[in-house]
Image: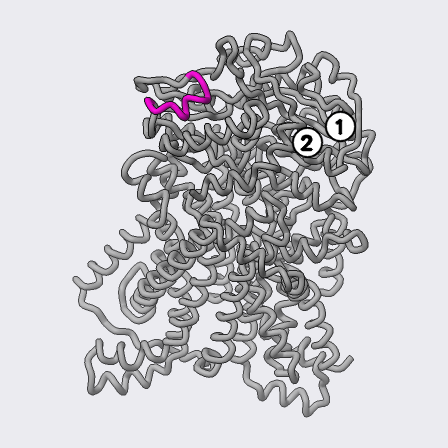
Amino acid sequence: MSQKLFSWIVFTIIFFIGVSPVAVMVIEAIGKEDILIQLLHSKESLDSFFNSLILSVFVSFMTTLIGTLVGLILGKTNISLKKAILFLILIPLLLPPYILALGWVDMLGVVGFFSELLFGFLGVSLVLFTLYLPIPVLFVLFYLKHINPHLEEAAYIYCDKKYVLSRVTIPLILPSIILSFLLVFILSFGEYSVANVLRYSVFPLESFVQFSAFYNFDGAIMMAMPMLLIALFVLFVEQFYLEKRIFKYRSFDYIHIFKLENNQKIYIVAIMIFCAFFMVVVPFWGLFSKIGSVDIFLIAFVKCLDPLLHSLLFASVSATILTFFAFIAAYIVYSKVFLVSKLIDMSLIFLFIVPSTVLGIALILFWNRPWIDFVYTSVLIVFFGYFAKYLFLGSKLIQHRLTQMPYSMVEAAMIFGADWKKILKYIFLPASYKVLGVVFIVFYIFILRENTITMLVYPPGYETLPVYIVTQMANGKEEIIAALCIIMTLSALIPFLLAMMLFRKKERA
Amino acid sequence: MSRIILICLLSFLTLGASQNGSVTVYVSQDQVFSEPILKDFEKKTGIKVKALYDSEESKSTGVMNRLLAEKRNPQADIYWANEPIRAEILRNRGILAPYKSPNAKGIDKVFKSSDNTWCGFSARVRLFIVHKDAIMKPYSVMDYANSALEGKGVIANPLFGTSTSHISALFTYLGEKTAKAFMKKMKINNIAISTSNGESADFVASGKYDFALVDSDDAISRLRSGKPVEFIYPDQKDRQMGVFVVPNAVMLIKGAKHSTNAKKLFDYLLSRDTEAKLAKADCAQIPLHKGVEGPKELKSISDLRVMQVDYAQVAKEMVKIQPYLKDWLAK
């Protein structure tokens, strides 16, 4: 099989699983614009749309601003406790978004001055800010590693720290700042579970209710259209503006570090630990204090055993398959096979930025047909959701690894007559083992925390833990729900920590 | 590697697929209360129950709507609804199959459909949760329009859940003209709208509002957790309309793949045993079978003045008044 044919087959799979459901949804929507106009005429829908817009602009602006600052401090200064601070900031990203919101509710209660602030714009903004802060931090840290330190050192001879930072470092990491702003914007625009817990009206929730409460497919599809347009806009910016401005990845042996005075270091570390503690530890303290005793924890554990097992099974099996496909997709994009590489890259980005509610509705619309109901009635439909949503993440990480490999190895293999399959199997695959491990963990965690797509499409009897927690919120005991949230947190954190330890051990070895 | 991928995909394909010794049930009753009942059924019969639960996010109507969407290719065998209005909607859409359960004997015919497509069991009643410090207390649903109680009350969004059913029942009982006049007065009286009955109950428990019309389980849970609240059954005097009763409803789905097991589950849900369990649970549901011990804080159905409505009529009214309710909310 030629490389081209193989690439088209892979694209067909991606198209069939993820893109075609969304495409069918758009086609179904043609001619029903009057429904959207009617829906947007309702005060509730219009209010929720503006709520979502203002919320996501505010959250993305704040997150990018503070995240860039944190990223620069962690990446470019000589402060201590860097790894501990980064780990604290990272925790919320590993969990279903509503867990932090529940923690704050448990901490502040449902009445009083602070809870008045929590149940509304400020509360939702705080939780989303905490949730998405790791994105700009990680982006900035990643890009800093690829800045040629000699550029900064040259500037440092004639200028002070501030000048070097503002005229050399920040312009070089600007694409990462824009990219993280767009990513946070799209993620916070599509996120509704936090707003639901904190009783704040947002647009994706309206769309979800149109589908889930009224089963109004036409209404749900039309409510999805504005979100789809925003996703397309982000895709456009990524493909036609940012791609040209992102320099080729190249790691340098060291990063130029701005050395701070001892007292400056103490102040900065203290402020950062205080903020991370406030944003992450306080809500978890709320959950812990609600649980009260070990017995409650054990009761919750026994109750959620089946959903927990489903979660672990879905996450590990899906992560295995997704890692395989991500490697293949990354290879095709890296190989720049005419047209198909671009199509795969754009499809994966598009599916990643499409809000989960839209994707979930599209999957049901497409796969709930009698002649193909083996997908809809089995766990395969849940897997398709994960495949469409998260394949992009792994593919990008692997692409980064492939671009770092010396091309001379491929050329040498080609001289000896190796075809593309042999090159893939004996050069690219062994060189990517480490990143494949990382990709597996990323998939595992993102699938484990997912609840929107799963809730829409899971077959009876196969609910996952994040879905189980959401259904328990209806009249469930607060202490049990808090314990379930802690179990969810541990099931994400333990494999993450184990993986980190394993990688560290291997690195040392 | 490719073998592993193939095995993984096949395992996904088989998970969730139909099994002979199982029954698929869609549940609108809160999972926290319904799951233990279904687990007991599993233990007792050995039949595997595959359940799909609703969430508050979908305003507890998600699974009903999934049933509507799956009409041509039904996946569920049984639907356990937390109110009979949805059963009536499904009946009108031809989704239900008739089944006369032996355990339906002893349940008042008001709580059953005439063609045996659904049967009620374990009910909630709609009552007032009132803050203990409230100076003036409501004794009738009409008190929402009483100017002496202006700005003191709260009600859950009438577009969702049992609030919709209750308002629809009022339209059925009072007639359109009187009901609309009442709704208009309620609006003038500055009655607050909450997102759910649970939120209404929390508002009253915190003292933000004096009273709210909620489901009995919402009131009981606040009372049991020591909140400063009491409850009042509305409209209990002679010639008053009485309290609106909201039973659970069980129904068999037309074309069910596991109809024998489904009938067993149908019978089990209607049993006295199930009613006794739901009465003892935190949801504190009132049994419809006579002689089954109910929750200690609540009166039995026979001790209450019950609002006499035809649920089929209420269901029709509910569909009819949706545009009016949307307008009412928007104004």
Q: Report the amino acid beneath label 1.
A: Thr
Label 2 residue SS: helix
Q: Is residue B116 left or right of residue A328?
A: right
Q: Position of residue B157 (x, y in %)?
A: 47, 36
- Chain letter of mark 1 equals B
Q: Is residue A391 above or below residue A356?
A: below
Q: Disc 1 marks which residue?
A: B117
Residue for point 45% across, 55% down = A49
Residue for point 54% across, 45% down = A466
Which residue appears farthest toward the front when viewing the image? B177
Residue for point 60% across, 44% down = A214
| Spatial CA span between label 1 and label 2 | 8 Å
Q: Answer whether labels 1 and 2 touch (C-beta < 8 Å).
A: yes
Label 1 residue SS: loop
Q: Which residues are magenta?
A: B139-148
Task: Look at the image and tell me whether residue B180 can be seen.
Answer: yes
Verify whether residue A108 appears in magenta.
no
* Label 1: few (<14), some (14–19) or many (≥20) C-alpha neighbours in 10 Å: many
Q: Is residue A106 left or right of residue A225?
A: left
Task: Look at the image and tell me whether residue A496 can be seen.
Answer: no
Q: Position of residue A118 (x, y in %)?
A: 34, 43
Q: Quadrant of residue A23?
A: bottom right
Residue for point 72% across, 22% down = B268
Q: Report the amino acid beneath label 2.
A: Ala
* Label 2: few (<14), some (14–19) or many (≥20) C-alpha neighbours in 10 Å: many
Q: Disc 2 marks which residue?
A: B87
Q: Along the polypeptide, which appears first: circle 1 or circle 2?
A: 2
| Numbered badge on residue B286 | none
